[in-house]
Image (cartoon, rainbow, N blue to C red):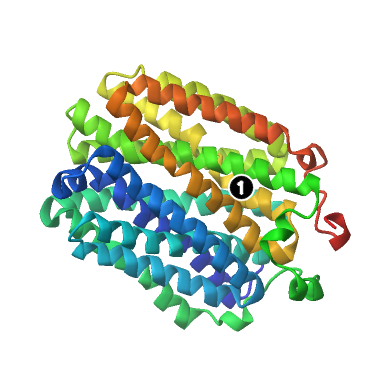
Amino acid sequence: MKLSKNDRNALISAIIASGTDDLNVMFLSFSLTSIIASLAISKVEAGWIATITNLGMLLGGIVFGILADKCNKFKVFRWTVTIFSLATALIFFTPNLEYLYLMRFIAGIGVGGEYGVAIAIMAGLVPKEQMGRMSSINGIVGQIGSITSAALAGLIAPIFGWRGLFLCGLLPLGIVFWSLIAVDADQVSDFDADLLKEARQEKGKIKDLFPNPTIAAQTICLMVMTTVQIAGYFGMMNWLPSIMQEQAGVSMSGSSVWMITTILGMCFGMIVFGNLLDHMGPRKSYSIFLVASALSVYLFSFARTEWSILIAGAIVGFFVNGMFAGYGAMITRLYPHYVRSLANNVILNVGRAIGGFSSVVIGFILQNATVTTVMLFLAGLYLLSLLAMLSISNLKQEYYQQLNESVENID
């Protein structure tokens, strides 16, 4: 890609920001056991922390998605990063559970807004035929953020406690300050920015994701898929470290090693999936990964030894989160330019809001059943996602045929 210095810096900012929001979100995974003990709360109450965060993401996705499609995307992007950074750092002062819920909700607003806006910035700079691979790179940087979170948990939490870990939420402000110096927001390029200029003035609302029965069904099916994606990811990443700490006697640093191994598997899975998506299209790519996810999640419940847990975690990560890289590319292709930010934000964050309840559901299952029951629950969700994906009629067409070549395609 031949980009100007300003565009290159804008692209780098958008990609790195995806890593910093994962950094902040994953702090909860490594501190959940300590939070439960410190605040004397139940597992169900602890599960609500992630769920409330995801509800904030839905609100932020809608609000900032609309703003980004109508205003300067890059300026909106900076505000989203600032919001989730400050709210995460303020968790340092947590006196009770209600305050923690509020700060996580506000942080969720920023994170939920950032994702779709960053994807829209990337889609405006990267050729469409490379968005699958670019989404993979974006997803990998997100996992690097998760690995950094694991490293910080091992270093900071033992010394300064879980509150000190959340104070590291200020780190993403670095990318905001750098972008203020390195990026002229008014000069960031955007492919096809003028193509639907008149339409953007008239539209860019949530109803534009449901203009006719075909597109409405497509939107709903994609929401089902992202719901399952988030339910599986947050369900495993929020609870499995705690399960290992409590049931297998693994320390926080030991569970961090498992998390890093799983995340490395995710990164490799994203690389593979992104290339498959660009070459095979979404139907075949998602079919392979969804079936494999259902099988690998169920088989994980049979892992007992330290090495089998590490290997199984990497395999589960490869399939379960490798798919995440494809949503930004797929949604960007299936919806027109003037709702690009909104479509990505609303579809993913509806998934986050609903899928986030998996933390509550899994907390309930763990209190009343076994880990195997949790894995069967998650495996069933991936098969549901497969059925939803196969129901999207527009994916049966040639993948590279753009639905947004003209407004009439969805009107």
Q: Give the vertical position of 318 relative to 2 (above or below).
A: above
Which residue shows up at 26% across the image and 61% down it?
Answer: 99
Question: Who is closer to the viewer here, 197 or 288?
Answer: 197
Q: Quadrant of the C terminus?
A: bottom right
For the residue labelled by badge 1, is the local secondary structure a helix, a strand or a loop? helix
Q: Give the vertical position of 255 relative to 200 (above or below).
A: above
Q: In this view, does 74 lie to the left or right of 173?
A: right
Which residue shows up at 46% across the image and 36% down it?
Answer: 232
Does any portion of residue 322 appear in the rendered image? no
Residue 102, how many percent across, how many down? 33, 61
Q: Give the vertical position of 54 relative to 383 (above or below).
A: below
Does any portion of residue 349 appear in the rendered image? yes
Q: Is residue 373 left or right of residue 274?
A: left
Residue that mark 1 sits on = 327
Which residue shows up at 47% across the image and 57% down it?
Answer: 57
Kind of residue indicated by mark 1: Tyr
Q: Is residue 104 left or right of residue 278?
A: left
Question: Who is closer to the viewer here, 210 or 226?
Answer: 210
Residue 33, how many percent across, how many down? 21, 42
Q: In which quarter of the image is residue 338?
A: bottom right
Q: How crowded is mark 1: few (under 14 residues within 10 Å), some or many (20 or more)?
A: many
Residue 244, how many percent across, how many down? 25, 30
Residue 290, how many percent across, how many down? 58, 30
For this orientation, the residue located farthest to the left is 159
Q: In this view, does 20 lie to the left or right of 14?
A: left
Question: Who is closer to the viewer here, 9 or 238?
Answer: 238
Which residue shows up at 26% across the image and 67% down it?
Answer: 90
Q: Quadrant of the N terminus?
A: bottom right
Question: Who is closer to the viewer here, 5 or 287?
Answer: 287
